[in-house]
Image (cartoon, grey):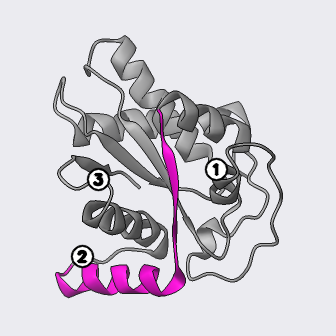
Amino acid sequence: MGYSGSMTLCGCKDLSNYKVQNTCSIGKVPDWVIVSGGKLGNTYAFYKGFHMCKELGLVGKMPRLICAQAANDNPLYLHYKSGWKKFKLVNANTTFDSAIQIGDPISIDRAVYALKNSYGIVKKAMEKELMDSIAQADSIGMSICPHTGVALTAMIKLRKIELAGQQIGLLW
């Protein structure tokens, strides 16, 4: 039986602190950090981890967060596109990334808080794009799961168009 509620959040926050320490040199943080979103707890946990590191003086700034979701199951993306007006549950359609196939994410409010406070955005990965990203990673010997593939898809798309020249960190 796993932990729930605040214990799970603390574990995710600790994981984010660990990843922050391993992906960012002291005082140097990427402009953007991409996290795959399912239940959305990690989105908030990474925000909280970076926020704590900033408060401790370990990093000089907060990165802007990007939450990536599979297009077949993207309630946060739809909420973001509505201007955060009204969250609507979705019927989770089948996606290659079954780990984030969640139509009613438990941490929606925390994720919205994290995205708003980090001036973040939400992106979606179409199923073909997701599989293409996994194949691209595989072609260079990097084996990734579909969960990571969603975040990689968002990074590839953003690097080409919107965030060209900016430093993007892929954390999950």
Is there any visible trace of residue 4 in the rendered image?
Answer: no
Q: Label 2 amino acid? A: Met
Name the kind of residue labelled 1 in the image: Tyr
In the rendered structure, find residue 163 and report the number of the disc placed on it: 3
Disc 3 marks a residue whose amino acid type is Leu
Above or below — where is 17 with respect to 78?
A: above
Query: How far from the left and from the top, in percent, is residue 159?
Result: 27, 61
Callout 1 environment at 10 Å: few (<14), some (14 to 19), or many (20+)?
many
Task: Pick whichever, 137 or 19, lies toward us.
Answer: 137
Res. 63 in view: yes
Q: Which mark is residue 12?
A: none
User: Mark 3 or mark 2: which is in front?
Assistant: 3
Task: Indicate the secondary structure of the residue bearing disc 1.
Answer: helix
- How far from the left and from the top, in percent, is residue 1? 73, 52
At horizontal 56% and vertical 75% (from top left) the residue drawn is 97
Q: Residues within 10 Å of mark 3 (few under 14, many from 20)?
A: some
Residue 142 is labelled as 2
Residue at 38% x, 32% y is 17
Q: Which mark is residue 80?
A: 1
Mark 1 / mark 2, whichever is N-terminal: 1
- Residue at 36%, 51% (x, y): give it: 171
The percent position of residue 78, horizontal first and vertical second, equals 68, 59
> Which span is picked out in magenta?
119-141
Does residue 167 lie above or below 36 as drawn? Answer: above
